[in-house]
Image: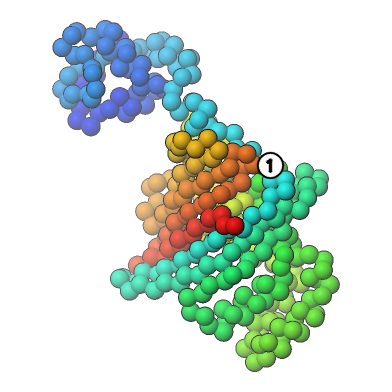
Amino acid sequence: MMVHFILPGDTLQKIAEEIQLENPAYLKEFHNNHCIKEDFIINDLIPGKKLLLPDLGRIKTYNSKNDAPFKSPEVNPDINFNPFHFNQNFKVVFTESKNDEGKISENRFSYVANLKWIKNEFNEHLFHFTKDRFSNLHDTKMEFMAIATFKSLLPIEIYVNSKGEILRTALTKQILNNFNEIKAKLSDVFPDQYAEIYLEEFEYVVLNPDVFDKKMKEDWFLKMYFSSFRNPFRNGKSFFEIFLNQSFVQLQQMVEKSDNLEEISLNQFLSNQKEKDFKFNGNLTISKENGMIKKMNNFYSYKEYSVEYSTDFSVNEVL
C-alpha cells in the first residue's frame, strides 16, 4: 500500500492514470476499504488529505477485470462499411477565411453532392459522384466557368476499398470518348482568350488520369467522406491520417455519448495537441446500419507568418 497526499487539482481519474490503474472507481473503492473514517471519500478529493493507493499487484488484479469505462463496447464501436444500394444527396457548405492581422476576407459557397453506389467488384466499391445546385459568394465569370467545366464531366467514378477508404477516381468512358465535343461546347459558351487558356489547362487535367486523380483526391468532400475514420477503436480511441496543408496529419477520434441507437457520433481532433499554429476539430454522425456518414462538420486552420487561414466545412443529408 502507498500513500499519496492530495494536491489541488488532483482527481481520481488523474491519479489513476499516473499509477496506470485503468478504472478509477477502484481507486476510490480501495481507499475507502482501508482508510480511517475521517479520510473517507464521498465525492471530490480534498487537498491535504491522504489517499491510499493500491500496490502493483492489486493494480494488475483490478486491470485484469477489463471493466474500465474506456473499454466498454459503446466507446469502442466496430464501424462497418456496407454501402450496397446507397444513393444519397448531401448539402455541402464550404467557407474559407483569411485573417491578416485583423483584416478578414471570406469566400463561401455551397452545392448539393450525390453519392450513388454502382457495384462491388474485386473487393472494390464503385460510386458515381456528382455536384449540382451551386451557390457562390462572388458569382464571377471564372467561377461560372469552373462550375460548367466540372459539371461537363459528371458523373465521376470513385473507387473505395472494403473499409470505405478512397483508392482512386476516374472519368467514365462515355465522358472520355465524347471529350472533344464537350470541349467544343464549352468553347462556344466561353469564347474569350482567357477562357481558351483555362480550357487548355482543363483538357490537360482530363486527359492525364494521374493528374485528374490527384486533383479529385484534394476535394474536401471526397477526402473527408472517404477517409480512414473506420479504423478500429482501442481503449476508447481511434487514430487515422488525412492529408491537410500539403502534409499528412494524424487525427484522433472518440465516441460522443448519444441516446440514438441507430447512429454513432464521433468527435475528431489533432492527435498532437502541441501544434500551436495548426488546429482541427470535427464531428461525424454515422449510420450504424451501413457505416455511411449522415452529417459531418469540420473546422481546420493554420498560420503562415502572421496570417491565419481557416476552412469551415459542413455536410448534411438532404432529400
Counting every numbered tag in the picture gives 1
Q: Position of residue 279 (x, y in %)?
A: 41, 54
Task: Confirm whether residue 233 shows in the render.
Answer: no
Q: Position of residue 67 (x, y in %)?
A: 46, 19
Report the front residue among 90 and 275. Answer: 90
Above or below 207: residue 5: above
Q: Which residue is mark 1?
A: 82
Q: Residue furthest bottom?
A: 192
User: Is residue 19 rendered to the left or right of residue 282?
Assistant: left
Task: State how the image is colored.
Answer: rainbow
User: Is residue 203 rendered to the left or right of residue 54?
Assistant: right
SS label for mark 1: loop
Above or below 218: residue 280: above
Report the front residue among 12 and 287. Answer: 287
Question: How many other residues sit within 10 Å of disc 1, few (<14), some (14-19) or many (≥20)?
Answer: some
Q: Position of residue 278 (x, y in %)?
A: 41, 56
In percent of the image, x 72 and y 70: which residue is there? 153
Task: Confirm whether residue 115 shows in the render.
Answer: yes
Q: Quadrant of residue 59?
A: top left
State the quadrant of the C terminus: bottom right
State the quadrant of the N terminus: top left
Report the front residue among 301 and 68. Answer: 68
Q: Amino acid at mark 1?
A: Asn
Above or below 253: residue 59: above
In percent of the image, x 43 and y 63: which residue is there? 310
User: Is residue 106 rendered to the left or right of residue 12?
Assistant: right
In percent of the image, x 62 and y 80: which residue is there? 145
User: Is residue 21 rendered to the left or right of residue 127?
Assistant: left
In percent of the image, x 69 and y 50: which residue is there? 86
Above or below 201: residue 40: above
Report the front residue among 261 and 104. Answer: 261
Q: Position of residue 110 (x, y in %)?
A: 52, 67
